[in-house]
């Protein structure tokens, strides 16, 4: 299992630890002299960047298994549509990413 999020690793890693998830792909924050600078280290892990990082982590364009993905923003749609099964949380409902109207 992988948590892939635009949220900064500085606190997502603790959530992942509690959930027993070993892998975190996230937005990284710059650290200088032991302090966070407020700047991103690389790109924000959102939208197409999220999907790019997942593919880089896997080392392929397709997962060799069943890829399940959940998101809560329209910017997650590229990842959700890539997955074998992608779900978008809208309010308190899960909506399949295919087909999904952005109206």
Image (cartoon, grey):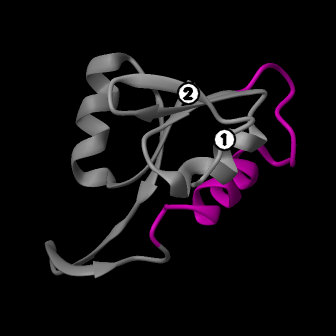
With 75 as the anchor, is 48 left or right in this view?
Answer: right
Q: Is residue 87 above or below residue 102?
A: above
Q: Residue at x 73, y 42 (%)?
A: 81
Q: Position of residue 37 (x, y in %)?
A: 18, 82
State the residue in front, 98 or 71. Answer: 98
Cβ–Cβ under 8 Å for marks 2 and 1: yes
Q: SS of the residue at dot 2?
A: strand
Q: Is residue 73 above or below residue 13?
A: below
Q: Residue at x 87, y 40 (%)?
A: 62
Q: Residue at x 26, y 20 (%)?
A: 18
Q: Position of residue 84 (x, y in %)?
A: 78, 27
Q: Which residue is mark 1?
A: 100
State the residue in front, 95 or 72. Answer: 95
State the quadrant of the N terminus: top right
With 31 as the anchor, is 73 left or right in this view?
Answer: right
Magenta region includes residue 31: no
Q: SS of the residue at dot 1?
A: loop
Q: Which residues are magenta?
A: 44-67
Rendered image: mark on residue 95? 2
Badge 1 density bin: few <14, some 14–19, many ≥20, Cα 10 Å: few
First along the sequence among labels 2 and 1: 2
State the quadrant of the C terminus: bottom right
Badge 2 density bin: few <14, some 14–19, many ≥20, Cα 10 Å: some
Q: CA distance from mark 2 to mark 1?
A: 8 Å
State the residue in front, 57 or 80. Answer: 80
Single out the residue that lies furthest toward the front. Answer: 103
Q: Position of residue 53 (x, y in %)?
A: 64, 56
Q: Position of residue 79 (x, y in %)?
A: 66, 47
State the residue in front, 32 or 81. Answer: 81
């Amino acid at each position: 299992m992988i948590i892939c999020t635009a949220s900064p690793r500085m606190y997502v890693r603790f959530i992942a630890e509690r959930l027993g998830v070993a892998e975190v792909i996230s937005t990284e924050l710059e650290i200088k002299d032991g302090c966070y600078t407020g700047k991103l280290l690389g790109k924000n892990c959102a939208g197409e960047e999220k999907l790019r990082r997942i593919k880089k982590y896997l080392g392929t364009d397709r997962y060799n298994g069943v890829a399940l993905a959940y998101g809560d923003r329209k910017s997650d749609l590229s990842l959700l549509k890539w997955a074998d099964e992608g779900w978008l949380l809208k309010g308190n409902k899960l909506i399949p990413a295919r087909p999904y109207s952005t109206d």
